[in-house]
Image (cartoon, rainbow, N blue to C red):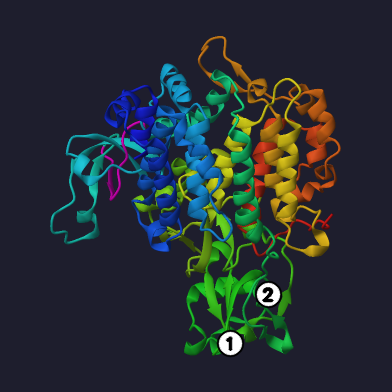
Amino acid sequence: TWSDVVRALRGGRLLDDFKDRCGSEFQVAELASSVVHAMAKLSLSPRGAADQTFMGTVASTALLLWCLDAASPAAEAPRLLSELRFRGSMPTLRGFACVTSCLLFCDIGGAMKYLTEAGHSTNLLWSPPCTLPAAQVKVGQDVEVCAQSGWISGVIKRAPAPQPATPRDECWQVACDGDMRVYSRHVWAPGWRADASQALERLRLAVLARAYCTPRVVAAEGRSMIRALLEGVIVHGLAARAQVPPPTPQGSVLRGANGVSVQAGDQVWLSITVERAKSLQTQRHGDWSDQMSFCLDYPGRVVETLSSPPRARISHGSLGTFLWNPSVITRAASTAEPLPFEEQHGPIVVGDEVLLIASQDHVVPLQFGHGGWSTRMAHCLGRFGRVATFNNRGDVKLDMPGCGAFLWNPAVIEPLGKGCVTTLCAQAMSRLDDEGAAVMLLVLLSELSDTKGSGDPEAVRDILSALERANSDPSKQAMVPVGLRSFGALALLAATVDLRKVLKSSAETPRRVEVQEVLLPECVPALVSALLGTLPAMDWPAAHTGGIAFREVVGGKVDVVRAVDIWTLAFFAARHHRLLDPRPPAADV
């Protein structure tokens, strides 16, 4: 497991034990080659990648290659990885190569030591906070529980009944202040919110502390490794999805009253009487509910259109989402402008990919009356999910690959362009897919590029070359695909900015790393700054990179740290589209 890897890198006797067991006759190069090729074969198998233990296999294999490389230069693990064939490969192979490269080239052990000295545990860098397992909860134990009024502390007074007769018998009974009793299927450990915040801080420091406390060394094998990974991750990984045209709402085009054309994504008005609506809502069109009468006075959004018979699923926010006979629609407008109930999260239709809020502390209370809470839902927070459908109360059912499908309150969906960057990257790195490989590639670029002295113009040219080769359109071979420009801006920053220039130590807590605002001309060599000013990226519109143009950062008009956050969110948003975006589109320059 990753915990075993971290413990080994913190200075245990693993490497010494490994050398003792190898002996003088051990064929290091042969074993390294066998390990890499066996893992490459396993990564190409869909069944292998789908196995729940696959990530543990990757961790064990990466640690073995690290041991081989440290035990003998004859292992040539970096060379073997750089020779992997990424064309036509599965995302898991690219993820495996990036994970192992990070282990080989980055001083992760030094970063772990730094975190330990700062008072952080490093056995598990980050995992979503979860409820207490039933086996760990006893009567008389102090816990935290979520009620309709919010989070409160209390003491367990009664356990769930072995043979429940009522819904309350299935719950823990928690005694809170006064005579208050709360019945809940889920309880949390006291102080769990502080622990969750510390876990995110630990994850952030794991990246920043590495740059802060370890010297930068450009390994001789690093250059060929970076070129191979740029080719694999960008050209053969991210490029295909980045060039797919933005999707549009799908479904049948329906006819409303007086021949009004209606399709998914439209704003619609149902300006008819209750009696007329009841007569049109036959059983085959979804039937009638008294709650539907409130929807006749307000505009709604068509989230889905169905045929045989023709029906339109229309959302009116908290008033509910119902199936309607299209004949009740008297007016329709094809616009992405948010309706009043959409102002927080933007317009949402079936097929959208939306980002959930990362804070469990904030999300759990919002789930009261909106589908409730499940322990597995914790792993969905801070991730993108696809809208599968809506229920009659307006709740959204999201399909989360690897986690399941759950009902969510629309209020837990992040607005366009917003989100927790730390959690988003952590969730990506926990999966061996192209997004996880892309995040780890940024770490490698930061580690292996020479950002001191005269800088590393060669790394900048390698990145730009890979970005341009990602375009499969023969007429635009010298252009970077629009969907890759946010990631391209991040990669160029990672290869040029010395992270130590944007970090500082607190005078009160010397071992604490903090991020300070810094402008790019202040933290890159003059030669690199001049090179960046000549790149085609200087002409990219701000709309292609989340609202902050590359030229604004190079010119020192925008803080580097803020640009990294915005560009990271824009990179993920470019891979997970909303079908309706109220923001104006930018021209392809």
Instruction: Give the residue at x 38% y 26%.
Output: 121
Residue 562 visible in the shown view: no
Horizontal side of 390 relative to 31 (left or right) equals right
Residue 180, magenta (yes or no): yes
In front of the other: 488 or 21: 21
On the image, the x and y values in percent for residue 468 come to: 75, 51
Work out which quarter of the rendered image holds the N terminus and state it. top left
On the image, the x and y values in percent for residue 469 come to: 73, 54
Measure how far apart labels 1 and 2 are at the Cα level.
17 Å
In front of the other: 59 or 136: 59
SS at circle 1? loop
Q: Is residue 476 above or below residue 332?
A: above
Q: Which residue is mark 2?
A: 269
Dot 1 alpha-carbon crowd within 10 angstroms: few under 14, some 14 to 19, many 20 or more = some
Residue 523 visible in the shown view: yes
Q: Is residue 347 above or below residue 536?
A: below
* Secondary structure mainly formed by the magenta segment: loop
Callout 1 amino acid: Pro
Indicate which disc, 1 or 2, sits on the residue closer to the N terminus.
2
User: Where, by quadrant of the figure, is residue 59 drawn?
Assistant: top left
On the image, the x and y values in percent for residue 566 come to: 68, 41
Magenta residues (range): 179-191
Q: Which residue is mark 1?
A: 310
In front of the other: 450 or 502: 450
In front of the other: 232 or 534: 232
Nearer mark to the viewer, of 1 and 2: 1
Residue 321, magenta (yes or no): no
Instruction: Give the residue at x 54% y 38%.
Output: 422
Q: Is residue 142 above or below residue 249?
A: above
Horizontal side of 67 relative to 291 (left or right) equals left
Callout 2 amino acid: Trp
